[in-house]
Amino acid sequence: MTTTDLHALTGAYAVHALDGEERAAFECHLAGCDACRQEVAEFTATAGRLALASTVRARPVMREQVLQHITTVRQVPPGAAPLERVRRGARRGRGLARWALAASVAAAAAFGGTAVWQYERAQDASRAAAQAQRHVEDLAGVLAAPDARSRSVKAAGGTGTLVVSAGRDRAVFVASGMSAPPRGKVYQLWFADGGKMRSAGLMDPDRSRQAVLMQGAVDGASGVGITVEPTGGSKQPTSTPVALLGVPV
């Protein structure tokens, strides 16, 4: 995928329409492209506004007014038909009118519910987009930090590179060519705090190349480990590490 192609993905990224590989490639590009970051922010804000829907509530007295008028409006002029037919027509008219009113009320409630649902989904999407944007900015901030230090190690048939910014107290793990974990398993990252291991997040099992912003501060950790854990991760390592490396200084 060329740089020109990546510039054209800002809108699709803003509405979460990219697949895994496209998203990964675009996020790597996004870390170094101010113009695309600005477009993503603008598209995200626009998508949120377009998704918002408003609804106008009917006045509470409208139902009573309609029902009252139904009983007073003549359906057939006097003398135009036998009295019993008129009465049947009036009853039928009132029944149909009440049915129509009920249908209208139900439709209004449905549309009102849809508007609320759309608004909530738009709010969720806006929050998710803002969170994704902060994640990308934090990741890029570590990789581009003036005090960034890195160290690499062989890991699961590929290479893992740990990038640490002491000033930001954050770390990024960049995987390249790592083999996929067994089915139902995932690679889990750990900070080594003395003799204890502290979870630092999970890697995407479907991507052999990825940059992961490790969860939590480095906070004086002496090293980083990678283990194979059940999907969802573990509270403590349950397998022999596939890689261990010290925190670069």
Image (cartoon, rainbow, N blue to C red):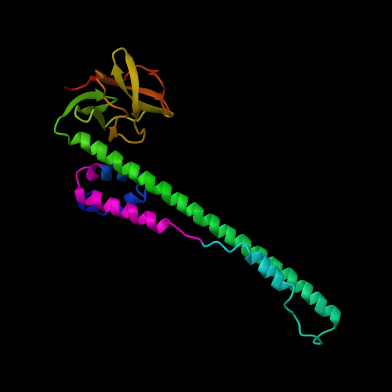
Q: Is residue 4 left or right of residue 240?
A: left
Q: Quadrant of residue 150?
A: top left
Toward the viewer: 190 or 174? 190
- From this view, report whether residue 58 is shown above or below residue 154: below
Furthest toward the left, the residue is 146
Residue 244 seen in the current view: no
Whole-percent x and y of residue 124?
A: 42, 46
Total number of numbered discs in the rendering: 0
Furthest toward the top, the residue is 195
Whole-percent x and y of residue 110?
A: 57, 58
| Quarter of the image with the C terminus in it | top left
Furthest toward the bottom, the residue is 79
Identify the residue shown where x is 34% and y is 48%: 18
Whole-percent x and y of residue 35?
A: 21, 51
Toward the viewer: 21 or 88? 88
Identify the residue shown where x is 85% and y is 81%: 83
Residue 49 lies in the magenta stretch: yes
Residue 62 seen in the current view: yes
Identify the residue shown where x is 34% and y is 41%: 131
Furthest toward the front, the residue is 61
Query: What residue range appears in magenta?
Result: 28-55
Toward the viewer: 180 or 211? 211
- From this view, report whether residue 100 is shown above or below residue 242: below
The secondary structure that most of the magenta stretch takes on is: helix
- From this view, report whether residue 232 is shown above or below residue 100: above
Q: Quadrant of residue 70?
A: bottom right
Q: Quadrant of residue 78?
A: bottom right
Residue 89 lies in the magenta stretch: no
